[in-house]
Image (cartoon, grey):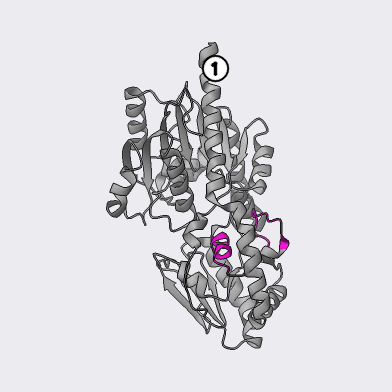
Amino acid sequence: MGGWKGGEMARILWVMGWFPLPPDKGVRIRLAQLLDTLAAHHQLTLIVLADPEAEIERYRGELAARCEDLHIFPRREFQPARWRAIRGFFSTIPRWLVDVELPEVHARVRQLWQERAFDLVIASQLPSALYVRNLNGVPKILDEVECGLFLDQVRTARNPLRRARRLLMWWKHARFLRALSRDFAAYTVVSDVEARILRRIAPEARVAVIPNGIDLARYQGIEATPEPDTLIFTGAPTYWANRDALSFFAEAIWPRIRQHRPTVRLWITGRLPEGITLPRPPGWLYTGYLEDIRPWVARAWAMVTPLRFGGGTRLKILEAMALGTPVISTPKGAEGLEFRDPGAVTIAGEPHTFARAVVDLLEDPDRRARQGRIAREAVRDYDWARLGERYLQLVEQVLHERNRATTIA
């Protein structure tokens, strides 16, 4: 596909909730892939809300080369004790959205809207929708809507007061998404699990499942010498769900593995959070941020994903599969991934079964090789060359519908 009206390029205003480069973590990988896909066919004006970790000056030129116009603003991080956040308790939308909203971004959107005629508006991640929801007369797409994480927080709350607050947050979140569905031509989610939740919230919404994917070509020819008895966990400890997974693994699973394999090691990649104590049992190594984790994953005998919370499609699992590194995961850790061969990922829901699965893989080189081969084949369904085409089809379908409506009118 290419072009939506006689081969023309559409003019798209796109508000991103993250700085997309470098593509070194899930949300950045998705945004960078979507950006490359759309930039090849349409003219893009980007408004980017840069996260605190963003290396703006290093990648500004590279990002600017992919669009017609680029506007970058520092993202405001949610601070529960801030006055805006407290005031958000009395709002009908989630208070974290009230707190992070930026007047200067609203002003820039209005300026661009008055100066140019856009054919489509895209908002990536929910906070971005705040700035474009009132733009009338143009179709809008809200990308990567997430619901499962908020439901998890309700289900896991033990304290009655905390549960009540999380129920209120969930009610506001659902209400806001339902209201937005009247203004947006389509929502995208990354898994069927998220789609089912969203369709219950907003039955009238058009929901398209566009999974996260990887560029398989980047995982070919990675040379690495396997490190015996080495496991890897590639979820950055800056994310609370990954920290919970590490604590769970350290307390309930790691000792069982060490009983059978005393020399086992675990590498944990990603930036370390400030002011937070992380578990450090014998054999654990926190690598810190790595610009390229592929050689590390390829050297490990297996990847572990002991997640208990969180949503989305697990890009780190897909990366390991593309490198032929076997994966052992909890059901939650692999939630959203669907493979025709169930042997692509080993699923273990209880600490003892998880530990047993890890030990079995470490002790059996044939099993590791077999699962690696199955994984390499199964991950082809998540090649971005296929998934990018699916997203482009959605965008151009929405554009065609708008063009037909304009022609009829």
Q: Nearer the viewer, residue 399 or 46?
A: 399
Q: Which of 106 and 63 is in front in this view?
A: 63
Q: In this view, does 187 lie above or below 381?
A: above
Q: Residue 121: x, y in percent? A: 45, 31
Q: Residue 177: x, y in percent? A: 58, 36
Q: Is residue 29 above or below residue 222?
A: above
Q: Mark 1 points at which residue?
A: 405
Residue drawn 65% across the image and 87% down it: 259
Q: Does the magenta stretch include residue 317?
A: yes
Q: Disc 1 residue type?
A: Ala
Q: Nearer the viewer, residue 344 or 305?
A: 344
> Is residue 190 rendered to the left or right of residue 77?
right
What stretch of residues is rendered in magenta?
316-342
Q: Can residue 93 be seen in this snapshot?
A: no
> Which image quadrant for residue 371?
bottom right
Q: In this view, does 7 lie above or below 323?
A: above
> Which image quadrant for residue 52?
bottom left
